[in-house]
Amino acid sequence: MQSLFFWKNWLKDYRWTGYAAATLFFFALLFLWFSYFQGVDGVIHWDTIQEQKTIETTVHSFRLGPFHLNIPAESYAITEYFNGSPVVPNTTASYIFLFVLVASAVVLLTVITTLEKFWYLASMALFILFIVGMRLEVLGIAGQFNRIPVVAALVLYVVPAFYFNRFRTSTSFVTRLVVFIAITVVLALVVTFLSEVALPMYHLTLTGYTPGLILSVIFIMMIAHEVLAAFIRVISQGSSRSLRHLSIISVIYMVNIIITALHEMGAIHWNFIYINIYLLLTLSAVLGIWGYRDREAIYGNILSFYPFGAYLYLALGAICFATTGQLLGNANDPALKIIRDVTIFSHAGFGIIFLTYIFSNFVVMLAQNMPIYKVLYKPNRMPYFTYRFAGLIAVLAFLFVSDWKEYVYNGMAGFYNSAGDLYSLQGNEVYTESFYDQGRSNGFSNHRSNYALGVIRGSRFNFEAAHDAYHSANFRHPSEYSLANDANLFVWENDIFHAIDAYKKAHEIMPESGALVNNLGLAYAKVHNLDSALVYLGAARDHAASKDAAEANFFAMAASELIPLQTDSILGVFNTTSHATVANALALSTLYSQPVNVKVDPLAVPKLNLQTATLLNNYIIKNAKTLDTTFTSRAYAIASDSLNSDFSIALKVALANAFYHQGNVARALSIMAEQIYVGQAYQGKYNYIMGLWALEQGNPERASEYFTFADTYDYKDAKFYNAIALTEAARIPEAFIAWDTVARSEDESERQIASTLKKILIIPAAEAMNLSDGEKYQFCRYRIGLGDSVLFNRIVNTFSNANYKAQAMLDLSRRYYDLELYEPAIRLFNRIAGLELTDKALYEDVRHTELRMLASRKEIRSLATQINKNITFDASRTLEKMLYTALINESSGDTVSAKKLYHVIGTYNPYFEEGILAASAFFIAHEPRGMKGYTILSEAIQVNSNSYRLLKAYAAEAARLGFDDYAASALERLKRFRI
């Protein structure tokens, strides 16, 4: 145990210095393994590319005469696929490498100062080469782009080194080390703050590449036989059969080493568990701590192991590990090719010769089971130098067979990759691409250079060159990033079938990649191969990295392909809070009017991205009928935030639907009109929606204007709905022309409706008796005027369907009522009471029409009586309920409560004429000197300009206030309303 923990016998200062050097050594070793397990993820990550599809859903439906109309809204579905990011240089790995390299160099320099004469001079010459190789002149320190900074650095190091070596030999090692550390810290500060180039320290990671790589190769060759030496130490401490045991274990070890070497050379491609080269390097280096001590007999005349030889070994090992860790951390595979091949070739070449050295010198001792480890480096036949020289020749033989020039080119490629990283960090695209291109030229099919070039050229839509670069990247060392990006190029070229082939090949190479499986499933979905898409998206769910994307794509596919699923149940199984997944689930549930339980707060994140904006939009559309004013206010504030300007238009349009269903039609129309101005490209769509709103609110004249605008932009079925609006407005000649246009539509159902309506619009009254009940109803609605009561009664008495008969009488009664012809309106309305209605919606409509009539005539007691007869008010009748409550409050003397209600009623919906009239009348009565009542009327007629009752009330109030011109204008407009 004493020989195992040999450092415990060292002097305290040497021991603590040894601990520091060992800490540096093992820190670099941990850094190597961290970089190894991180792999290419150190410089590349997945970018999730999102595509948004519009899923047209229905916010609500309404009945208008014979038509059942849907008001559309846009939900959105997000699809997500993975694309490898541009190379992001691992600056942390590079700076760790630089720190370890410089720290180890300081330790080595301190050790050099303890050497004698020739060895001191030779070692200092190498250290000078190291400083020169760091190329401080490229940093422009204090504006000096010449050798002056190099000379200054050499003076700072060489002078004290020479002083300690020749004049102050008694100075302790720790003192010398502290002096060199101080010099290094000063130089680091000078480089950091006085260099004129950007990223000066990163420049040094580049210039440190070559010395780090050379020292690593030297160290690897130093330790190449340490595993075999460890076998000998263990075996020769046994009591018997040392020769047999050594022979067996050596053969097994060397066979595996040679097989791995042949695999690295590309000579064999067996389905075999090869030796992990980095593990082999680690074992050899750690064992070498004791092995190097045992070799003191070889180099002891130059440098004793205690303690300076140990420091030398640990410093060189730290450099090797840090260099390898930095190359792994930056996925610099051409340079790693040198490390890997030198490691395995050294272990093969030096291993073979070392066994020869053992058997040549100690075979008799092994046969006699003597502890040869004690004299392992005291040969009696084959000198140790011969072993080293022959081992070097053997390693060179491997290198030459593998084409030694390739290693030179790989070394240059590794350097160019690092240079490309430097200029990438500086944002110099020209130099970045140039250096990566040189890296590609020197390092045949290296992943790093080709991947970087593939991303650069793909971003420029140079797909042919990008494909070529990715094919080269995938030739030897493919990564899931390069495989995915190559296939994604086909998607960008809209060549989905080739993309599927590429994804399938990539999946065969890397079957455990969730990203590739997700992309493959999405590609199948794009070509409507739903079975395959479901299989691969299901497989992608099994991978944590792709689970959310796969689930989002599943719901997006279901919504796009109109697959009726139980959304809430599936969302529960997924148990996810992914914004994209929940947003897509909301779109699907809206499409099929399914309830869904959402666990995500759509207002939680005020700064939106595509996912959260889609979630908020779909949540609003899904719950447009039930959202409260607090939610819509907060959502509108988020949509109006300049940070969310990219999503503002779509969100405000969705919110307009919510305001509409809150009864705030004025706000909804205002928002929509604003979006028409802001989003010129969507004028057709927004006018179309406002036209439908106007139809539902009973203003076909205004609806026709909106549909005419929508038709100008050739939006959807604007022609069809404009024909409906013109028919509802009783503009028969124009309506006939519009229906004639619709009759030439490609839609069969529209052509049939147009044919029927054309017949209704031109059929003689005498022939109307022969129509079906449905056609008679249309004739009554569109052809019979208020003065044709005799004809109406003749036709209505021929209905066999009570629902059609009641609807016809209700329609005509409302028309009388709108022109304040209350007597015929009430008389006709009362006739409905004797009919047996089977249409529940019609029955409720009749009951609520009665309430509006009672409210307009201020028959408060009868109104209250009817309300108490189990009349229900859904969300669409919120304003009506508020009106009746306000009237009852007013009649009971509670003007405070009534005033609050009238303020809402008078401003929310200009088409709710009873509410507008009641609110204006209240404020005129209670604030006769104020303008509130007048303002309510004037703002209402700006929107609802075709209302007889509003114009009449406005003319009276304008005249009362002395606005004679306005009153005269309103009275002139009233003349249009003739029976």
Image (tube, rainbow, N blue to C red):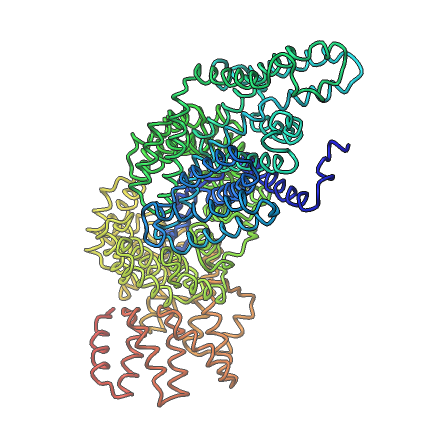
- Judged from this view, the residue extending furthest toward the right is 239
Quick one: 221 or 35, which is closer to the camera?
221
Picture layout, residue 797 above or below residue 46: below
Instruction: Please identify the quarter of the rendering in which residue 936 is found.
Output: bottom left
Instruction: Please identify the quarter of the rendering in which residue 856 is found.
Output: bottom left
Quadrant where the N terminus lies? top right
Instruction: Please identify the quarter of the rendering in which residue 4 is found.
Output: top right
Quick one: 909 or 680, which is closer to the camera?
680
- Judged from this view, the residue extending furthest toward the front is 167
| Whole-percent x, y for residue 324 in the image | 51, 34
Left or right: 800 as drawn, with respect to 21: left
Quick one: 754 or 413, which is closer to the camera?
413
Picture layout, residue 270 above or below residue 285: above
Residue at image location 64% in from the left, 32% down from the top: 289
- Judged from this view, the residue extending furthest toward the bottom is 929
Quick one: 532 or 381, which is closer to the camera?
381
Report if residue 60 is visible in the image: no
Residue at image location 50% in from the left, 75% down from the top: 885
Residue at image location 46% in from the left, 51% down from the top: 188
Quadrant where the C terminus lies? bottom left
| Whole-percent x, y for residue 783 in the image | 26, 57
| Whole-percent x, y for residue 571 in the image | 56, 44
Number of numbered markers: 0
Left or right: 814 as drawn, with respect to 569: left
Picture layout, residue 674 above or below residue 310: below
Residue at image location 20% in from the left, 76% down from the top: 972
Left or right: 685 as drawn, with respect to 60: left
| Whole-percent x, y for residue 821 in the image | 33, 73
Report if residue 889 is visible in the image: yes
